[in-house]
């Protein structure tokens, strides 16, 4: 069945890069997503990548996709205290009627 | 979030009671999803509705859970004979595919 796995915690020093990793099982996934959940807030779409892409960059965010290994990563450059949140990896197919499967989330904490 | 209103925002109920959670999306969205997020857990898919098609109920954890969507708009999630393990944040979301989901703020259910 579909499954998305990610580590539960990551701690980085302010100003360093954060790399959050994710693996998924459904090879038919068309989209891979990263969602961000800040403390006490709802989930917000951070970025996504099509399955036919290897990389996507958006300002401080870089998404890398290794489709062969079904591995997705999110790199946050120059990590700031405002980046503290839970980051969810998710996979889905191209259809407005397709459910998206989420990972358990990685809690990113920033130390001074 | 904008576009999806959930009520109540918080609900405390006694074990064994029934509860109804409401999701009110803005008009024009045919796909509607329910997820739940337990403490320290990821998002667990529960059910989704797509237009007039039969809903995908594959994520409902037991027959105590049911959901309906009236008139293609408002949806209610009903939990009968609540148990303590039902305590979680129940999230409603609309759409899917390219732009991912837009989530509501959720209903925090506490069963005591």
Image (tube, rainbow, N blue to C red):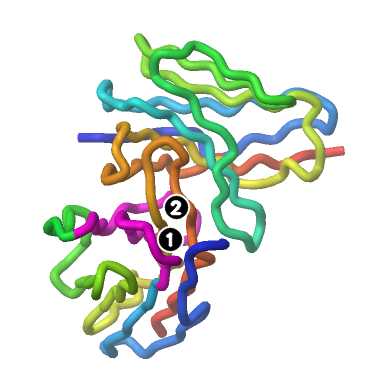
The Cα atoms of the two marked residues, 2 and 1, are separated by 5 Å
Q: Which residue is mark 2?
A: B41
**Is B25 a magenta residue?**
yes
Q: Residues within 10 Å of mark 1 (few under 14, many from 20)?
A: some
Q: From which residue to which does the magenta span run?
A: B24-51
Q: Which residue is mark 1?
A: B38
Pick the residue in front: A98 or A76.
Answer: A98
- Residue drawn at (73%, 25%) of the image: A59
In the displayed structure, A28 sits above or below B89; it is: above
Main structural element of the magenta stretch: helix, strand or loop? strand
**Is A100 a magenta residue?**
no
Secondary structure, mark 1, is loop
**Farthest front residue?**
B28
Q: Chain of mark 2?
A: B
In the displayed structure, B10 sits above or below A98; it is: below
Residue B105, image x, y percentages: 53, 66
Snapshot quadrant of residue A87: top right
- Say which quadrant the C terminus of chain B sits in: bottom left
- Residue drawn at (29%, 38%) of the image: A95
Q: Is the Cβ of the residue at disc 2 closer than 8 Å to that at disc 1? A: yes
In the displayed structure, B77 sits above or below A58; it is: below
Residue B70, image x, y percentages: 24, 75
Secondary structure, mark 2, is loop
Snapshot quadrant of residue A107: top right
Pick the residue in front: B32 or B59.
Answer: B32
Q: Chain of mark 1?
A: B
Residue A41 falls left or right of residue A33 = right
- Residue drawn at (46%, 83%) of the image: B11
Snapshot quadrant of residue A17: top right
């Amino acid at each position: 069945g579909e499954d998305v796995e990610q580590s539960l915690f990551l701690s980085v020093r302010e100003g360093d890069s954060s790399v959050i990793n994710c693996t998924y099982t459904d090879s038919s996934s068309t989209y891979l997503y990263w969602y961000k959940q800040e403390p006490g807030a709802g989930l917000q779409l951070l970025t996504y990548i099509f399955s036919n892409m290897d990389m996507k960059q958006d300002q401080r965010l870089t998404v890398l996709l290794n489709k062969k290994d079904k591995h997705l990563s999110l790199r946050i450059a120059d990590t700031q205290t405002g980046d503290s949140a839970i980051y969810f990896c998710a996979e889905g197919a191209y259809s407005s009627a397709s459910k998206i499967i989420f990972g358990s989330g990685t809690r990113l904490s920033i130390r001074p | 979030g904008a576009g999806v209103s959930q009520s109540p925002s918080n609900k405390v109920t006694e074990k064994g009671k029934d509860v109804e959670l409401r999701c009110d999306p803005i008009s024009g969205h045919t796909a509607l999803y329910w997820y739940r997020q337990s403490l320290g857990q990821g998002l667990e898919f529960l059910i989704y509705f797509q237009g007039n098609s039969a809903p995908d109920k594959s994520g409902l954890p037991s027959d105590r859970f049911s959901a309906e969507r009236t008139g293609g708009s408002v949806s209610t999630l009903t939990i009968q004979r609540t148990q303590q393990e039902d305590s979680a944040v129940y999230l409603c979301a609309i759409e899917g595919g390219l732009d991912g989901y837009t989530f509501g703020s959720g209903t925090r259910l506490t069963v005591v």
